[in-house]
Image (spheres, rainbow, N blue to C red):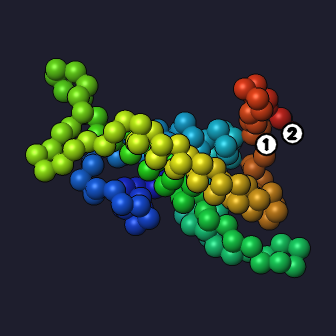
Amino acid sequence: MALITLSDITAKKDVSTHLGGVATQLIEEAELVDLKPLLGEKFYYDVVTNKNEAGFSILMNGGNYTYDGFDYSCPGLKRVLIEFAYGKIVFFGNQKSTPFGNVVKTYQDGQVSDRGASKERYTESSKVAMALWNDVKLYLDRVDLFDNWNCAVSKTSRGFKLTHIR
């Protein structure tokens, strides 16, 4: 069900290719926790089902489109998800579950980064993801190609969760 893979992330970000199952888990979490609420349930499943269809190419991979006589760029949902997943990998990626509990991996030739620094990178990555999302949302609102977009998208305002259903 994942819309991206670790190789998609390593193409844009400096991340180890040896994360394996940890990266897969964090990518899936980013998709379900961060991306799905932005898309709304119905449109999320529409995207998952049709992600390889020609009509979803700009939405998924990014590209240029014309609206009201101007050319715009859409970064694509994959790019948004890469930022969300990268933040989770930076923040949670060095934790390992063992028979003795949850531990942080340490290495002979290196030092684990400070938890505060990891949190800052996570926060900044989330901000970048939301900035990219705003461009994707503009694309979705402008092109009117997707029937299930905006069916029931939740919006958060000042800590209250409001749902607008059309």
Q: Which residue is mark 2?
A: 166
- Work out whether residue 77 can be spotted: yes
Please give left or right for residue 12 compared with residue 39 in the image.
Answer: left
Quarter of the view holding residue 139:
bottom right
Q: Quadrant of the C terminus?
A: top right
- Distance from the alpha carbon under mark 1 to that under mark 2: 6 Å
Dot 1 or dot 2: first in sequence order is: 1
Of all residues, the one furthest to the top in this rendering is 100
The amino acid pointed to by label 1 is: Cys
Q: Residues within 10 Å of mark 2 (few under 14, many from 20)?
A: few
Q: Residue 145 appears at what percent x and percent y?
A: 77, 62
Using the image, determine if residue 96 lies above or below residue 30: above
Instruction: Residue at 34%, 39% (x, y): give it.
Output: 114
Secondary structure under badge 2? loop
- Work out whether residue 48 can be spotted: no
Q: Residues within 10 Å of mark 1 (few under 14, many from 20)?
A: some
Instruction: Residue at 78%, 53% (x, y): give it.
Output: 147
Q: Observer-nearest residue: 121 or 16?
A: 121
Checking the image for residue 33, the label placed there is: none
Q: Residue 48 appears at what percent x and percent y?
A: 56, 51
The amino acid pointed to by label 2 is: Arg
Instruction: Residue at 69%, 59% (x, y): give it.
Output: 136
Q: Residue 79 appears at what percent x and percent y?
A: 54, 60
Using the image, determine if residue 116 lies above or below residue 8: above
Q: Which residue is mark 1?
A: 151
Please give left or right for residue 24 compared with residue 123 in the image.
Answer: left
Secondary structure under badge 1? loop
Query: Pointers 1 and 2 in contact (CB under 8 A)?
Result: yes
